Structures are given as structure tokens and as C-alpha cells.
Amino acid sequence: MKSFLKNKNIGLNSIERIIKDAGFARLKKRSYKEMGITNKNKIIPQRSETINIETLKPFKVDCPSCGIFFFIPYIIESGIIDIVKKCNLPESEAINSINASLSFLLLKLLGNERLSHMDSYDQEPGFGVFAGLNILPKNTYMNTYSCLTSEKMLLKFQREVIVQFKKIFPDLYGGEYINLDFHSIPHYGDNETMEKIWCGAKNKTMKGANTIFASDSQNNTILYTRGDILRKEESSEIKNFVSYWKSINHEVTETLVFDCKFTKYEILDELASDGIKFITLRKRSKSLLDKILRIPDNEWVKVNLKIKKRKHKNISVHENTVRLKNCKNNFRQIIIKDHGRLNPTVIITTDENLSLEKIIEVYAKRWHIENKLSELVSFFNLNALSSPLMIRIHFDILWTMIADTFYRRLSKDLRRYELLTSKTIFRKFINIPGQIEYNGEQFILKIRKRAYTPIIKGIEKLSNPFEIPWLENKKFKIIWTP
């Protein structure tokens, strides 16, 4: 052995030193784990689990966006917790479906880029209290939870949510018109199962997810969404919405408003036969434009549109009845010119009760849903594709719809700030630091006064302590400090 070491120029002392160093390294490695640190000096995340009130000790923790707790009375009022139980959303041994759902809702209310991009929040015990957990679940859990769901489960959940919201928040669903539109979410990978679609955000054709949204025209509240639509199914999607809306209201009394590319003439004929009222555009062809040019001047009617900020309010209108190709029903056709565009606009509708002015006004305000989609992209990061798997996309936009509804409900109680967008509400009222305290009897949220504090203090739901069902009905109190 000595001769071997001598040949290798290694002494016994060196061997002993190497052994000692190795043993110290093992001890050091164990001590790192004991301290909750990896070999690369990164903190090992604490395991997420449901808060046990019986063993919970008093604590005080800082919370970066404690205004998120302002939504809790609205969440309790909405009854969405009972719906989560009713629809049997997935759960694990450590995290039940209510805790999981509240975690997803929390991240959506914060306007997080993706559910999986939550590194800034997964070690915040204050956010954990919101969801009834010690801390939020890790991003792997958040990113893969939706794989345990199905389209049938999500559609049922969406229906139950809207039925309940219409009962509890009737002010958000009182419109006589429903705007519908497709929205394409671009995908930058090479997933072979995704179709190439036109992505307006990039102004080009590329792979992406084709989604649909329906919104209440009066309050711009989202009524319906779905995330797995093939190009060959686009024209029939309006029939899926009609079936969905009938399952909620038993009939469709509202007038549907959409653009000319939303469906085909044959589908419009089916809707007309079913008594569904709609307003849409007719596709312009060369022969149609030639017919319009031959209409005598004395058959055009001058109409004044009472739409604020509209540049061209005095327009020329011609109305007649037409039967479109391959259709059995007649449609009311309204042709518009002198409205600031090069070619005339042709509106077709089955609504016989509305005046010319009202029909034009209703369609002119269809851009409200485009504004809504822009808001969802801006704050809820709708265009940040969560996954190439369609079920995960559907899950993500469904919780986006729910979070947006809670923002709309909160805005109703913000006196003089009812029309603010979600992004502005978050900046002014939600994204404020504070401290969460548990004294053994109740939870206390301490927030320093700010410029918009009087607006929040004017909300009756937040002025008195309220009980949180998922924290064993412990009381939650908000205190404003100097």
C-alpha cells in the first residue's frame, strides 16, 4: 500500500485529509438539508397543506398585495365555493378542491402572467391564508392541476357558475344584447397538434389556440368561453352557445351580435328558423356592391346617430328584405353609406322590432367585446398561452372569466370608479402592502392609509368583520393604520 502511494505521490496524511474532507462535506450536505437549503444554496420550498386552525399558532406576516383580501366577501357571497364542491373538481390528500380553486383564483386576481409563473408568490404565507393554506402550491402543481379535468367537467362548472352569478349579481347580466367574438392566442412552439390560425396580435397566420368569448353588452361581463375550437368547427360554435344559453335561461331572448366571419349563411338560416334574433354583417361581393350603386338617391334615408365621440353621425341608410344564398328565411337588410368608409356596410338581422337607428347603434357598439378582450390580454395576460394542451387553455381562460367578474362586481361598489378597468383597480386599490395577523381568535389585516382609502372604507362589506368558511368560520377584520 505504501509502495503504491509512493508511486502515485500520495501520502497517508493526504488520504486521511481527503477522507475527513469528504466526511465534512456529507455533514455539511446534511446540515444544508436540515436548514432547508439545497446544494446550490437555494431554499427548499415548504410543503403546501391546509391550515389546521386547532394547531395554528399566532403569527404576523407581511403581504405585498393585501388588497386581494377585499375580494373575499364577494367570493363568499357568490357561492362559488359550493359550486366547486358540487362539480367535484380534482383534489389531493394535502390540498382539497376549495384550496386549489382559491389558489388559482388568487393568481388570476393578481394578474399573474401564467399560473406556472408564480415564483414571486409561492413563499408568501399571507397569500396562503387567502386560499386556506400555509403557502400556495408549487408551480408544478398549479401547472398540471388542469390535466385532471375534462372539457365536460369545465363546461358544467362554467354553467353552474354563470347560473349562480346571475342570481347573486343580477346587475352584471342585464343586457338585451350579447356580443360574440373569436380570439386567437398565439403559440410560439412547434406543437404539431395545434392548427395554424390568424393571430391578430401578431398580424399573421401562425399556430395557436382558437377561443370564443360572449359578453353582456351592457356591463361587458363575460358569459361564455371555450378554448378548444377547430377551424372546421368555427361556424357551428354559435349553435353551441345558443344551446348553452338555453340551458341557463330556457330561451334566448337577447339579440346576438357578431361579425360576418363568425358563421355561415346556412347557420344564420337555422338560427332564424329557431327564432333567434341576431345582428351581423353581410359579406361584400362585387355583385352586391354593383347592386348598391344602382339604388336611386331618393330611396336613401338620412339618419342621425346619437353616439358620443362618433365623427360621422349623419349617415345615409337604405333598408330592404333579402333571401341569402341557400337560405329559406328572409332577412332584414340595412345598407349604410356616408359613414366614413370607402365601401358601404351591409347589416342583416332578424330583429324586426328595433328601429334603424338602434340596430346601427347596437352593431356599432360591438367593439365593446374587443375592448374587453384587450383588457383580458393587458391585465390577465390572456395571450400568454398556458400550454399547447387545449384542456389547460380552457381551464386558464375559465378562471380568467371568473376573476374578471369579481373585478366587475367590486367596481360596482367603488363610488365614482365604477368604469375602471381591472388593471387600474388593481393598481389603485389592490396592490397595496399590509400585514396579516392571527391572534388565536381572529385574522386581522392591517393596512396603512392611502389616497384611495376612503373609497374602500365606504364599502359596507369591508367595514365589518366577516367569517371565512374555509378557515372554520374564523372572523377576518380590516384595520386601517396611520
Image (spheres, rainbow, N blue to C red):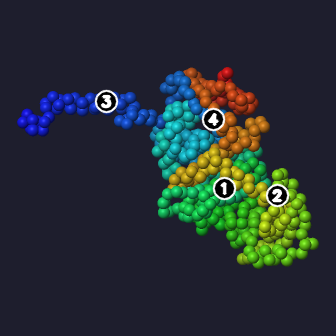
Callout 1 amino acid: Phe
Q: Nearer the viewer, residue 302 or 434?
A: 302
Q: Secondary structure at mark 1?
A: strand
In space, the residues marked 3 and 2 are separated at their CA atoms by 73 Å
User: Where residue 329 sits: x, y (%)?
Assistant: 77, 73
In space, the residues marked 4 and 2 are separated at their CA atoms by 37 Å
Q: Nearer the viewer, residue 29 or 46?
A: 29
Q: Secondary structure at mark 3?
A: helix
Query: Quick one: which residue is furthest to the right in this view?
Result: 298
In space, the residues marked 3 and 1 are separated at their CA atoms by 56 Å
Left or right, 379 with respect to 114, comes to right
The circle drawn on residue 420 is: none
Mark 3 highlights which residue?
28
Question: Residue drawn 71% across and 49% down?
Answer: 221
Q: Secondary structure at mark 4?
A: loop
Q: Earlier in the sequence, mark 1 or mark 4?
A: 1
